[in-house]
């Protein structure tokens, strides 16, 4: 009997996995039903009014940017002094702002796929990350706790082969499920936009951006599954993975962050795993910290700093690699009885 097929059958037969699949379908179904119930196809008049409001908002943004530049040049007229202008004119530069006003922003009660697909995809990724971590931890944790691994080793007495096959089967199953779930999830909301909303502007840039987020999200799902598997292997129980995550969140993300703030440590977010998760998933995340500016020479000081996807991925891969390697080393040497 093929070991990979046996592990896939064992994974699919687990009640916890089946329960998580049911919860996955329920969560997606509730989200889709709520969206469908709260949306309608916009009338021609609604679209026209929204287009006019978006055009007016863009014109106001251009005017504010022009006034900001005039202020820097000393050309601002006295009657325009009362207009709020940011210190950095790039904040109101229509060519550089993160997002200019569009028609969908002014359509009330209308689901627009182009505007809502990205936050919906983040929700999907978050649920799949949780799914992968819990399934990965319970898959190996239950076998170690119940003695199932020992019985399996009697049939195939190669520890690293057995553990590696289990991890490979887990990652393959989670990857396949994630692809199918993503297609069904985004496809359902695309149909909702066609029936009871509007698609919006679905150009090449939109699909490239959405595809990049999806790709990074799938990598994160697989890493979370491997981490859950590794921690449960180290702790020999599913609860070890749950306890480790809870302890890290309380002790480090909350407790250590508070200590770093009290000690006035510069740029404390760079020491937090959540920062690197955000940096990888979004591609770039910015943080504010004016501590380097307080003691330096007078003049301009940029209080913003960023984490990009490259360093973030390196940290996540290193963490996953260390935990997985430690799990295999310990599994190879320790007594399983």
Image: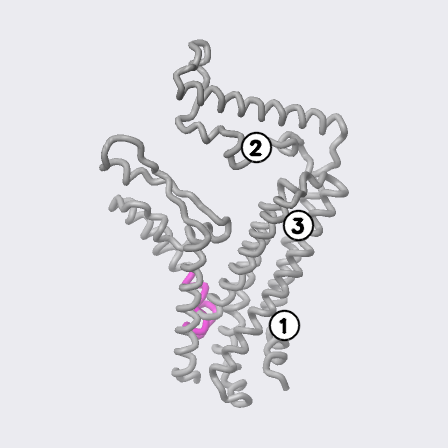
> For mark 1, does the 10 Å Cα neighbourhood hold few (<14), some (14 to 19), or many (20 or more) residues?
some
Note whether 69 is above or below 145 in the view shown: above
Mark 2 vs mark 1, foreground winner is 2
Furthest residue toward top: 79
Note whether 245 is above or below 269 in the view shown: below
The Cα–Cα distance between marks 2 and 3, rounded to whole angstroms, is: 31 Å
Q: Nearer the viewer, residue 221 or 13?
A: 221
In which quadrant is the C terminus drawn?
A: bottom left
Q: Are marks 2 and 1 in contact (CB under 8 Å)?
A: no
Mark 2 vs mark 3, foreground winner is 2
Q: Nearer the viewer, residue 14 or 291?
A: 291
Residue 224 x %, y %: 49, 62
Furthest residue toward front: 73
Left-right relation of 248 to 210: left
Residue 87 x %, y %: 39, 26
Q: Which residue is mark 3?
A: 30
In which quadrant is the N terminus drawn?
A: bottom right
> For mark 2, does the 10 Å Cα neighbourhood hold few (<14), some (14 to 19), or many (20 or more) residues?
some
Mark 3 vs mark 1, foreground winner is 1
The disc label shown at residue 12, or none: 1
The Cα–Cα distance between marks 2 and 1, rounded to whole angstroms, is: 46 Å
The Cα–Cα distance between marks 3 and 1, rounded to whole angstroms, is: 24 Å
Residue at x 67% of width, y 39% of height: 201
Q: Earlier in the sequence, mark 2 or mark 3?
A: 3
Query: Magenta stretch containing residue 100, yes or no?
Result: no
Residue at x 44% of width, y 63% of height: 317
Q: Earlier in the sequence, mark 3 or mark 1?
A: 1
Residue 159 x %, y %: 47, 84
> Does dot 1 land on a helix, a strand or a loop?
helix
Q: Which residue is mark 2?
A: 100
Q: Which residues are magenta?
A: 231-245
């Amino acid at each position: 009997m093929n070991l990979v097929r046996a592990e896939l059958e064992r994974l699919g037969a687990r009640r916890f996995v089946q329960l998580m699949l049911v919860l996955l379908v329920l969560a997606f179904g509730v989200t889709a039903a709520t969206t469908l119930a709260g949306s309608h196809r916009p009338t021609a008049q609604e679209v026209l009014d929204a287009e006019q409001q978006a055009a007016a908002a863009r014109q106001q943004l251009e005017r504010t940017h022009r006034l900001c530049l005039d202020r820097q040049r000393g050309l601002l007229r006295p009657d325009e002094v009362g207009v709020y202008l940011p210190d950095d004119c790039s904040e109101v530069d229509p060519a550089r702002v993160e997002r200019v006003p569009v028609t969908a922003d002014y359509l009330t009660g209308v689901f627009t796929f182009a505007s809502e697909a990205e936050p919906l995809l983040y929700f999907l990724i978050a649920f799949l990350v949780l799914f992968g971590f819990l399934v990965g931890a319970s898959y190996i944790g239950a076998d170690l706790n119940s003695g199932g691994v020992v019985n399996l080793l009697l049939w195939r007495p190669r520890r690293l082969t057995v553990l590696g096959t289990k991890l490979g089967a887990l990652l393959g199953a989670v990857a396949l499920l994630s692809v199918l779930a993503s297609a069904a999830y985004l496809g359902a909301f695309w149909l909702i936009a066609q029936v009871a909303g509007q698609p919006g502007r679905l150009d090449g840039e939109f699909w490239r951006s959405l595809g990049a987020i999806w790709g990074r999200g799938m990598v994160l799902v697989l890493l979370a599954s491997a981490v859950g598997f590794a921690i449960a292997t180290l702790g020999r129980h599913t609860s070890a993975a749950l306890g480790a995550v809870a302890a890290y969140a309380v002790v480090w993300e909350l407790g250590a962050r508070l200590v770093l703030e009290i000690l006035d440590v510069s740029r404390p977010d760079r020491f937090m795993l959540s920062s690197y998760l955000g940096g990888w998933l979004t591609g770039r995340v910015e943080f504010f910290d004016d501590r380097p500016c307080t003691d330096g020479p007078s003049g301009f000081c940029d209080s913003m700093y960023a984490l990009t996807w490259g360093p973030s991925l390196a940290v996540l891969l290193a963490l996953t690699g260390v935990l997985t390697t430690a799990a295999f080393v310990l599994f190879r040497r320790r007594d399983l009885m």
